Image (tube, grey):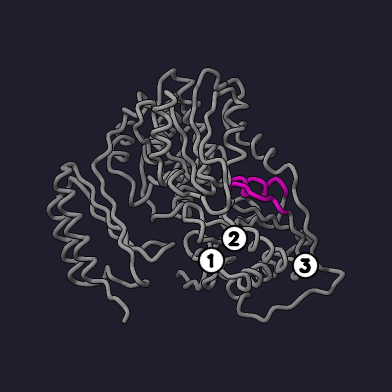
Amino acid sequence: MEHSRTYFGTDGIRGEVGKHPITPAFVLKLGWAAGQVLNQGGRNRILIGKDTRISGYMFESALEAGLSAAGMHIRLLGPMPTPGIAYLTRTFHANAGIVVSASHNPFYDNGIKFFSNSGEKLPDEIELAIEAALDRPMTTVSSGKLGKAKRVDDAAGRYIEFCKSSIPPYLSLDGMKLVVDCAHGATYHIAPNVLQELGAQVHSIGVAPDGLNINQDCGATQPQTLRQTVLAQQADLGIALDGDGDRLIMVDHKGEIVDGDEILFLIARARHQAGLLRGPVVGTLMSNLGLEQALVCQGIDFLRAKVGDRYVLELLKQNNGLIGGEGSGHVICLDRTTTGDGIVSALQVLAICQQEGKSLHELKQGMTKYPQILRNIRLPEKQEVLAVPAVQHAIAAAESALADKGRVLLRLSGTEPLVRVMVEGQDAALVERLITELVEQVKAAVIHPE
């Protein structure tokens, strides 16, 4: 049975800065509570990294104070992609790594997420123990036992070397012209260097963070600027990362967007053909039907997890799999790292282009995506609108209209007060009509507080 959580969602604790729980006072207490739970067995070192949003300074300091009060020593990584923090947590043999980031959200949001000493998301029981510690009064260890903080000066360099090591040493990106969009986020000082050091000619955009422009009209959630730049530069392809560097969306030389489902297919197919794929490929309930069919045609098993990279990872591990991901661009290559990593995933695709001597546009032809429309409906507050009979009738009618040639999915977001409505099918006009009807029914079911 899953215990109910007060603060931790599918991806840590996230919300608007200044509104509970994303306040300095709460994050101070969170640092202390994490220190209480994670301070075990003589090792008492925790890493803190962040993305480039302005509130990161405030929350980094609050975590540092709380951890120190609990007797934990702190290593400050500065701006660092989420997967980089996971990697360095392992190599420093730290008790845990803490990420101050709201990923692809706008600058006025922030969040806190944790990695275990193995570079994976914290187990549920540890998150629940931290929540329990938050209910206790905060205490401070004796002055002689307070934690010290040190800055890690070469954090970026260490992670750059790790990224480069994720493709074979004989492979070079010489002759490739690439555009990389770092979303004014945590990869701004890392992704361009990785690609240049491997020999590519790189045109960088989204590499001037000012604390306020993270994810603004750029990055993996809004790849239009990347598209235009790839065409203007006549580049071989484009790479879009999100604010914390765990998502990847690509653009081929014709300006066509290549999403997480297609990237997952390319990597899985290449591993399979090389005899290196083990277990099933894991997608989510949102993964395009075209991905499932293309993998089945290759003789590759496909499983669907609940939406959220932590659930993809769980299902991969349960089934001894290596490759999984989401259409949004979270791609997990467990034969290379422990979590979704935008730079590492991009390098896998670039390696396939070089090894097969084909463009990204040619490579992606092996998969045909079904028309899929996703609409987000913002709620004034979290509500169980999906249980409303009129909404359930509309879902049943849409599923009946699609028969076995499509799918309908409605779900509440794990990170924001949104209902996500997805319809997918072979007939684009039918998909458009059905989603319009479903959205109308959901909107009618929303209760607006007085």
Q: What span is in magenta?
A: 76-92
Image quadrant where residue 233 sits: top left
Q: Is residue 80 magenta?
A: yes
Question: Is label 3 in contact with label 1 (beta carbons under 8 Å)?
Answer: no
**Sequence-wise, which precedes: disc 2 or disc 3?**
2
Q: Identify which amino acid the numbered label 1 is placed on.
A: Val
Question: Is label 2 in contact with label 1 (beta carbons under 8 Å)?
Answer: yes
Image quadrant where residue 189 sits: top right
Residue 240 rendering spot, x and y as whole percentages: 46, 39
Distance of label 2 from label 3 (alpha carbons): 25 Å
User: Could you tell me which secondary element the residue under label 3 belongs to?
Assistant: loop
Q: Identify which amino acid the numbered label 3 is placed on.
A: Gly
From the viewer's perspective, is 194 left or right of 418? right
From the viewer's perspective, is 137 left or right of 410? right
**Sequence-wise, which precedes: disc 2 or disc 1?**
1
The residue pinned by badge 1 equals: 17
10 Å neighbourhood of mark 2: few (<14), some, or many (≥20)?
A: many
10 Å neighbourhood of mark 3: few (<14), some, or many (≥20)?
A: many
Q: Residue at x 50, y 21 (%)?
A: 176
The residue pinned by badge 2 equals: 55
Question: Is label 2 in contact with label 3 (beta carbons under 8 Å)?
Answer: no
User: Could you tell me which secondary element the residue under label 1 belongs to?
Assistant: loop
Q: Residue at x 49, y 38 (%)?
A: 181
Front one among 316 and 257: 257
